[in-house]
Image (cartoon, helix red, strand yellow):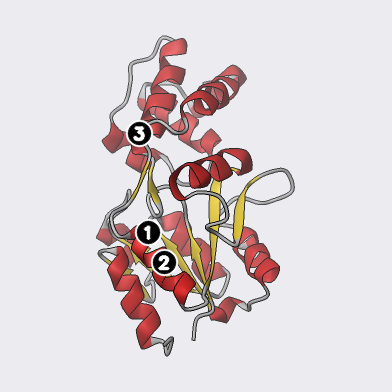
Amino acid sequence: MYKCCLFDLDGTLINTLAALTRTINLTLARFGLEPVEEEHTKIFVGDGYKNFVKRAFAFRGVGENEVPEEAFAAYNHYFEENCLYRIEAYDGMRELLAFLKSRGVRTAVVTNKGQDRAVENIEAVFGTGCFDQITGEREGMPRKPDPAPALYTADRLGVSPRECLYMGDTNTDMQTGIAAGMDTVAVLWGYRGREELEAFHPKYMADKPEDVMAIFEKSGLK
């Protein structure tokens, strides 16, 4: 029986595409580069803001080693101003969280978004205290797909990895959950497609948040 559900943030809990795309386009414009579309953002994000910036710059013809250090600082500046731009919970997510809470399941967020911005996003959409733990990128905490953030979160909540269900929408999430020894749910409402996620053989696939309720019920949760 699962006692805890760990959620990725972007593309799993919250649709942040507009905010991410707005931020990266402001960054590109500062360096005289053309914008990207939301469909590009879906592919570029997933394992930290620096990789996001590098991929967007590469898409506009700038080599990885040619991205100026100022670009990362610019991204963080613009993101601080725009991280809440048009963000919203995915349909059915509030109902899923209420279902888990009513049955005593601990909930947590494990994300490569910076800690402060992660908390800001979560509280803006779901309010304060909705989750038992929010683990974002910060000094001393490796980024996913390193399993350390997921294992740290489970330890903080007093549950073992085998008692956790890990949910995410990217290959990074699949690698994280599997490496942490957690049963992994590939969510199909986020930023990546079924084929990419299936390649990692997650234990479950979910087309909508309601499917996750069924997973918990079948696992013996009453």
Disc 2 residue type (three-letter):
Ala
Identified at 60% across, 17% down, the residue is 70
Residue tagged 3: 86
Q: Which percent across, then down, holds residue 84?
A: 44, 33
Viewer-proximal residue among 101 and 142: 101
Disc 3 versus disc 2: distance between alpha carbons? 23 Å
Disc 1 residue type (three-letter):
Arg
Who comes first in sequence, dot 3 or dot 2? 3
Q: Which percent across, then down, holds residue 15?
A: 35, 45
Residue tagged 1: 94
Disc 3 residue type (three-letter):
Arg
Identified at 52% across, 62% down, the residue is 176
Residue 129 location, quadrant: bottom right
The crowding category of the residue bearing disc 2, from other C-alpha atoms within 10 Å (few below 14, some 14 to 19, many at least 20), is: few
Identified at 55% across, 40% down, the residue is 120
Residue tagged 2: 98
